[in-house]
Image (tube, grey):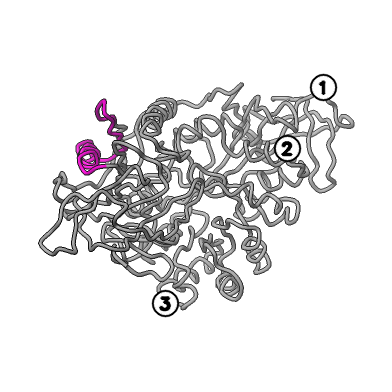
């Protein structure tokens, strides 16, 4: 029997009291809270025992770690569970990839609650390694290994009542599973229709107006603070306005940031902004349990102890984390062991030739993808061909070969099909700040083809071919050479420890920023420049794509 004198929070009465908490560690009721003895009022001499933080929407693959390693890192920050959408690996390997994630997660006591991917591929306008059909979703539902239908990105299909889309929503309803949403900028009658189709959450809101509109439509809002999309500062007023309708999530968290903080950072920031600690912890700890019907408990007698111990309710310094009554983290160190795993992958790309990267266009107006710090949305920016570096004139006098021009903050973007032999698609990006070299990655949402950005075709070629040589990973090309981080699991995840992945990634991130990037997370931003379902302009392996009207665009306009 374990005992702990702590302060506890009564969420229903919004009171804090001191108590002696006892839980079993040896019997058949291992980890179950056997007794909570109230001692008196809040005692400032005691630490605070909280239900534990939950990431309500995350793609574990974006951490570049296996679920077991993600768990080792997350528990250090008081995270006890994640609601995880495995659609990244599903785009590469289909159901086989989802099953890989589930089986790996079963090797850790950390609570990973997977959903069945609803939109694989996300669109028909890109090449993926696999797909998830209605029968695949039913197979996953029947397995008992998933808890919900993952984000329904095909909101046009919902609004047009596409049979394929509606059949998936109906299937989830038949199983009693919640359905996650993904509907950037959807408001008014369209948001009402989307919610009425049975979709209950959205993590894509970037403004208060949009979030309030969707809450009015009956949806719950997941405030996202990830490595690329950072919406907390825009949306935090919702915490006090709608404490029962809000959850916290990261969506995508790169390894270097996960090594420093997780959901605990949102909790700290929310309390610092003046929100009630009860409202904040309801969003971080309680609401996900209730919405997704997670078997985690909320520190009640007879429930399993999944909890985090913090010094105070201001800085929330994590002292210990427990999963099912077992201590799994102490003083910032994980007590979970690493486990061995075998890589699985799908990679068939051949090296790219320099000539494949040349971009011909007519003189005049050129469409570019304009990126912004902390946003997944891009803008269509039309600029004159005179602002580019003109490499050569073709036979037609009006046609030229365009190249990046760092002086005007113009970089070249390239996407290459990794699943079969094909020529790359090329376009241009403004707003990145890159001044030399190139970076490349097979983490390219959602199809995870090879994506690269650079200042010249020679550097881009080196970066892409380096990624091909290691059959997936990330790469930086500088004047000093080529640096890579291999990701042998689907080109998305490493087999290394969380600590080594974080260190290696941070090293490459530093080298990338030395190329001149003005973005906080160059690799994360790059990975979303192929995500066609988020407007405005993106690049798939098939060409320049406009997410506003779901159509391909020419470089010239």
- Position of residue 223 relative to residue 255, above or below, is below
Disc 2 from disc 3: Cα separation: 47 Å
Image x and y of residue 298, in percent: 70, 43
Q: Residues within 10 Å of mark 1 (few under 14, many from 20)?
A: few
- Viewer can see residue 166: yes
Q: Residue at x 19, y 37 (%)?
A: 469
Image x and y of residue 450, in percent: 28, 47
Residue behind mark 1 = 45
- 463 falls in the magenta region: yes
Describe the element under mark 3 as helix, strand or loop: helix
**For the residues carrying marks 2 and 1, which lies nearer the camera in this image?**
2
Q: Which mark is residue 163?
A: 3
Q: Residue at x 22, y 52 (%)?
A: 419
Residue 20 appears left or right of 221? right
Q: Residues within 10 Å of mark 2 (few under 14, many from 20)?
A: few
- 443 falls in the magenta region: no
Confirm or deny contact between disc 2 and disc 3 (CB under 8 A): no
Residue behind mark 2 = 272
**For the residues carrying marks 2 and 3, which lies nearer the camera in this image?**
2
Q: Which mark is residue 378?
A: none
- Pick whichever of labels 2 and 1 is earlier in the sequence: 1
- Pick whichever of labels 3 and 1 is earlier in the sequence: 1
Describe the element under mark 1 as helix, strand or loop: loop
From which residue to which does the magenta span run? 456-483
Image x and y of residue 376, in percent: 47, 52
Residue 525 appears left or right of 26? left
């Amino acid at each position: 029997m374990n005992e702990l004198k702590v302060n506890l929070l009564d969420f229903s009465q919004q009171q804090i009291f001191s108590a002696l908490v006892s839980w079993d560690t040896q019997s058949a009721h291992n980890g179950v809270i056997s007794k909570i003895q109230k001692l008196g009022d809040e005692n400032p001499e005691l630490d605070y025992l909280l239900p534990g933080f939950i990431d309500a929407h995350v793609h574990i693959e974006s951490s570049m770690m296996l679920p077991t390693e993600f768990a080792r890192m997350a528990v250090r920050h008081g995270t006890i569970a994640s609601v995880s959408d495995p659609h990244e690996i599903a785009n590469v390997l289909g159901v086989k990839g989802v099953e890989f994630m589930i089986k790996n997660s079963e090797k850790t006591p950390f609570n990973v609650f997977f959903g069945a991917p609803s939109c694989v591929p996300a669109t028909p306008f890109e090449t993926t390694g696999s797909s998830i059909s209605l029968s695949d979703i039913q197979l996953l539902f029947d397995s008992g290994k998933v808890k919900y239908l993952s984000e329904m990105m095909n909101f046009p299909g919902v609004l047009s009542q596409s049979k394929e889309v509606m059949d998936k929503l109906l299937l989830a309803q038949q199983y009693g599973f919640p359905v996650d949403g993904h509907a950037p900028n959807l408001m008014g009658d369209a948001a009402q229709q989307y919610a009425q189709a049975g979709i209950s959450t959205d993590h894509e809101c970037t403004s208060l107006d949009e979030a309030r509109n969707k809450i009015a439509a009956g949806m719950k809002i997941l405030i996202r603070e990830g490595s690329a999309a950072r919406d907390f500062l825009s949306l935090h007023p919702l915490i006090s306005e709608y404490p029962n309708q809000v959850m916290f999530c990261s969506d995508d968290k790169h390894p270097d940031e996960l090594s420093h903080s997780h959901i605990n950072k949102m909790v700290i920031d929310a309390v610092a902004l003046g929100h009630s600690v009860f409202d904040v912890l309801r969003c971080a700890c309680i609401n996900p349990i209730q919405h997704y019907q997670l078997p985690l408990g909320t520190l009640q007698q007879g429930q399993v102890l999944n909890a985090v111990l913090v010094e105070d309710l201001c800085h929330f310094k994590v002292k210990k984390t427990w999963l099912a009554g077992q201590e799994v983290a102490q003083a910032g160190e994980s007590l979970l062991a690493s486990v061995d795993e075998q890589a699985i992958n799908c990679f068939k790309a051949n090296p790219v030739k320099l000539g494949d990267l040349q971009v011909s266009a007519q003189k005049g107006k050129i469409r570019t993808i304009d990126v912004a710090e902390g946003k997944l949305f891009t803008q269509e920016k039309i600029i004159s061909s005179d602002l580019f570096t003109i490499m050569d004139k073709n036979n037609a006098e009006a046609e030229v070969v365009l190249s990046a021009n760092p002086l005007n903050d113009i970089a070249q973007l390239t996407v290459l099909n990794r699943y079969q032999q094909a020529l790359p698609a090329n376009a241009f990006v403004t707003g990145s700040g890159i001044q030399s070299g190139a970076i490349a990655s097979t983490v390219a949402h959602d199809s995870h083809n090879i994506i690269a950005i650079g200042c010249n075709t020679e550097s881009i070629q080196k970066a892409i071919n380096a990624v091909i040589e290691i059959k997936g990973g990330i790469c930086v090309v500088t004047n000093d050479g080529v640096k890579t981080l291999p990701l042998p699991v689907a080109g998305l995840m490493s087999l290394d420890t969380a600590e080594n992945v974080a260190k290696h990634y941070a090293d490459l991130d530093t080298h990338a920023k030395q190329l001149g990037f003005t973005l906080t997370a160059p690799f994360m931003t790059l990975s979303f420049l192929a995500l066609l379902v988020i407007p405005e302009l993106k690049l798939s392996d098939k060409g320049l794509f406009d997410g506003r009207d779901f159509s391909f665009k020419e470089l010239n306009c």
